[in-house]
Image: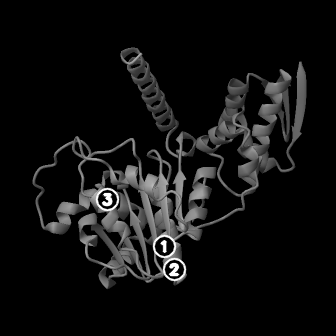
């Protein structure tokens, strides 16, 4: 049996690392098939050498999260473990402690995964950024945080948030109320992110001044958007024509962020997604970044990651089965 010892220099770090009722320790034991004994600020890891080394690397990665001042949540623990299994933890531990902005409740907004860090960096350094990946990866929330930060610094004069008014697989029928009431359900995720960043009162004040605009995609036609930070959410539900229309609204001193998940297209059957097409067409154009998220970047409940992985596996199996059937029919 092989053994390694990890010394922790601060008792509060040890408490955060162990978790409630040593739940983080138990998770490490189950994942890496090792035995872990904790004594005050010392951890002894015993087992097969390869497994012990992985567990120790995961512990150091978790400690790096704590030293950055971040909360060691269940999601962040599992993320550290997944990075160790893919030999990628060094990329995350060496990340600068970057705070994008402070919410209305005083909470700092930071990237929580390597994918999120790459996404934030791409937005900062490109005029147009595409964020493509599954639900729960923080695409919308981080884009709104970047928009609010740019607005507070005076880099842009307006924040414009938009998305196509497409129902998610069900017909809502004729909704009551005026036009704003009818489109509100489609724009609710954008409202939620803005409320969190600015607070309801500040948001309403900016909305009345016209410095913040939340509108359906159809409202973008015919406009040139200068000095603006523009976010298109749920872009997988745009048609090819709508995507071209939106991208050509870009004005001087503006940024665009286009987010979507190509596995959740709600367009009518037979209609092609503008997002699927545009990431192929614009992939090699300077000053346009395409950031792809995967299941590791999901920052929601663990089951969301498991669901996404199950769907990805099923789609891969279906694709392989189709290829095998095509080979049989065309020997």
Q: Mark 1 touching mark 2, by CB under 8 A?
A: yes
Whether residue 113 is visible here, answered yes or no, is no
Residue 85 visible within the image? yes
| Among the 4 quarters of the image, the one containing residue 40 | top right
Residue labelled with disc 1: 148
Residue receiving disc 2: 152
Label 3: how many Cα within 10 Å (few below 14, some 14–19, many 20+): few
* Residue sitting farthest toward the front: 331
Colour setup of the view = one colour
Crowding near the residue tagged with mark 2, few <14, some 14–19, many ≥20 C-alpha atoms within 10 Å: few
Image point (51%, 80%), residue name: 152
Residue closest to the eye, 241 or 98: 241
**Marking on residue 188:** 3
Q: Is residue 84 left or right of residue 120?
A: right
Cα distance between the residues tagged 2 and 3? 23 Å
The answer to which of marks 2 and 3 sits earlier in the sequence is: 2
- Tell me the quarter of the image containing the C terminus: top left
Asked whether 223 or 298 is in front, the reply is: 223
Label whose residue precedes the other's in the sequence (1 or 3): 1
Establish if 224 lies above or below 48. Answer: below
Residue 19 sits in quarter? top right
Residue 304 locus on image (x, y percent): 47, 37
Task: State if disc 3 and disc 1 touch (CB < 8 Å).
Answer: no
Across and down, in percent, residue 136 comes to 47, 47
Distance of mark 1 from mark 2, alpha carbons? 6 Å
x and y, in percent, of residue 277 in the image: 38, 52
User: Horizontally, is 275 left or right of 1 in the view?
Assistant: left
Marks 2 and 3 in Cβ contact (< 8 Å): no
Helix, strand or loop for disc 1 = helix
């Amino acid at each position: 049996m092989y053994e390694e010892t990890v010394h922790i220099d601060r008792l509060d770090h040890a408490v955060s690392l162990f978790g409630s009722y040593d739940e983080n320790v138990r998770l490490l034991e189950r994942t890496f098939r090792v035995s872990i004994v904790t004594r005050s600020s010392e951890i002894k890891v015993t087992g097969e050498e390869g497994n012990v080394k992985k567990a120790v690397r995961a512990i150091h990665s978790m400690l790096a999260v704590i030293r950055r001042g971040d909360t060691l949540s269940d999601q962040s623990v599992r993320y550290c473990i997944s990075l160790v299994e893919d030999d990628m933890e060094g990329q995350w531990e060496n990340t600068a402690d970057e705070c994008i902005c402070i919410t209305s409740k005083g909470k700092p907004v930071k990237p929580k995964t390597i994918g999120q860090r790459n996404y934030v960096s791409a937005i900062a350094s490109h005029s147009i950024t595409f964020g493509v990946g599954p639900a729960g990866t923080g695409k919308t929330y981080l884009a709104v945080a970047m928009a609010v930060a740019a607005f507070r610094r005076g880099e842009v004069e307006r924040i414009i948030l938009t998305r196509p008014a497409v129902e998610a697989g069900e017909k809502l029928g004729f909704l009551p109320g005026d036009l704003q009431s009818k489109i509100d359900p489609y724009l609710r995720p954008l409202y939620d992110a803005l409320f969190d960043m600015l607070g309801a009162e500040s948001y309403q004040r900016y909305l009345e001044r016209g410095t913040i605009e939340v509108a359906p995609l159809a409202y973008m036609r015919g406009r040139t958007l200068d000095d603006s930070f523009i976010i298109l959410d749920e872009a997988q539900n745009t048609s090819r024509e709508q995507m071209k229309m939106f991208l050509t609204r870009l004005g001087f001193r503006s940024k665009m962020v286009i987010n979507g998940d190509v596995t959740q297209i709600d367009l009518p059957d037979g209609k092609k997604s503008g997002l699927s097409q545009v990431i192929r067409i614009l992939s090699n154009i300077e000053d346009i970044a395409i950031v792809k998220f995967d299941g590791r970047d999901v920052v929601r409940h663990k089951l969301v990651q498991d669901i996404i992985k199950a769907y990805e596996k099923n789609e891969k199996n279906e694709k392989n089965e189709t290829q095998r059937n095509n080979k049989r029919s065309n020997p």
